[in-house]
Amino acid sequence: MTELQNRWYNAVQKSLPASPSTTQLIQPAPPLAPSDTALWARENTVPPASLTFNRQVAESALFFEAYAAVIQVLSVPESTFVTAIGPGIHQEWLKYLRGLTPRPDEDRLPDVFYAWAMTYHPDVANEGASALRDIVRLGALQRFLRSYQGPPPRPAEYLGGSRELLGMLRDSPPATVSFGSATTSGDVSGTWTGGVNKDCSGLWAGAGRSDAITTGFARSAVTVEAELGAYAVWPVNPDPRWYDSSRLHEAYAKRTSPPWASQPQLHWDMAFGEKSGRLQRAIASLLVVEGLTSVVTSDAAFTSGDQQVIKAEAAAGLWPFFVPTGDGVTNKADFDKGRTRLETTTPMGKPLVIGAHVLPIGRYLGGSGECALRPPAGP
């Protein structure tokens, strides 16, 4: 089944197109609920290193949680402020600050310092205010991130929501994926995972890839004609109210203290390391379709008993999209002298997330800006 999935992967990335340097297929693909939080939940994921992400099998960290854990252990020591203005001026500033009644709120300290320094020490006003502002901003960000813990916990917001996604799909063109297992290469060695494609489902959602029926299907000559009523690449952008890319970039680029605290509970390898880091990758965009009609044929000769099993399990969602029956979705399994015909249809207005563009965290944080890392919004 993995070999068949590899061939299907190659067909998808050539037909849509979707670059093998970033594309990941997602299964199963139930219709998105019509809410912003449902869409954001699909975006708020650290994908596994696999060409297929089986959400029923593979465990994945939440991007927000992994990001917040890093930010909480960062620090900007007071010494950076002292170095910027000098120990003597620092003592004068502390004496002045103790005399203020009431004491200014923390977020006002940089402006208060700047006004004071421009009067008494103008040469260090800008540098000192900048250093103090850095300290204050990190503290404010850490407190803000803690507010998401609840109770109750808050969902992590992303830019754009359900209404905007539906609007993009309305303006997006249709697409077709035609596939024949006998004529499509299964070589995925040149992909971003180096060929790793694990945790694939069997013929239906929940079936093992070594299941006997699945194995018979995967070894047969399989064709797919998938008509997509609309296909769009949806950019994934964390809300800048909680996401500070410069802080995360600094944490990734430097393993020292600062920016890491001198004795953090979380260190660089735990966050970004190749073996066990929880923030090794991020989703740059989602591959979204609506109005799907997928017809799959196989020349495998299934027994009457196997045919009954396939018909009974079809409602769980069938390969290659695994869209469960319900909410306007239909799955049908028909047989002609043992030959299989599987059909999945979904309505317009019910988006399906069938894949994602995945970037290693270094590439996600690099470049001249976040927008440069996002694939274009269209095929």
Image: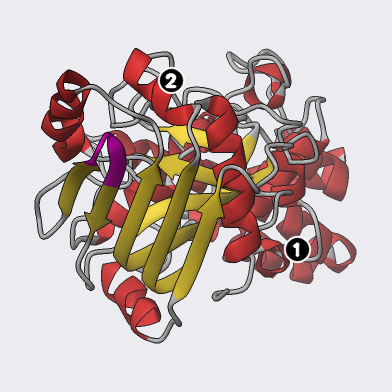
Residue 215 numbered tag: 2
Whether 167 is drawn above or below 135: the answer is below
Q: From the image, which quarter does the C terminus lie in?
A: bottom right
Q: How far across and down, in percent of the image, does residue 296 sit? A: 36, 49
Give the SS element for disc 2: helix
Residue most extreme to the front: 337
Q: Position of residue 85 (x, y in %)?
A: 84, 49
Asked whether the residues under the numbered discs 2 and 1 touch, taking CB atoms below 8 Å apart as contact, a structural biologist would say no
Question: Looking at the image, can residue 237 be seen?
Answer: no
The residue at the point 22 percent across, 72 percent down is: 349
Q: Nearer the viewer, residue 58 or 276?
A: 58
Q: Secondary structure at mark 1?
A: helix
Three-letter code, disc 1: Ala
* Residue 337 located within the stretch drawn in magenta: yes
Q: Nearer the viewer, mark 2 or mark 1?
A: 2
Residues rendered magenta in the picture: 336-341
Q: How is the image coloured?
A: secondary structure
> Please, what is the dominant secondary structure of the magenta stretch?
strand
Circle 1 sits on which residue? 117
> How dense is the environment of label 2, judged by Cα within 10 Å: few (below 14), some, or many (20 and up)?
some
What amino acid is at disc 2?
Thr
Task: Provide residue 79's location: percent of width, then percent of height.
Answer: 78, 34
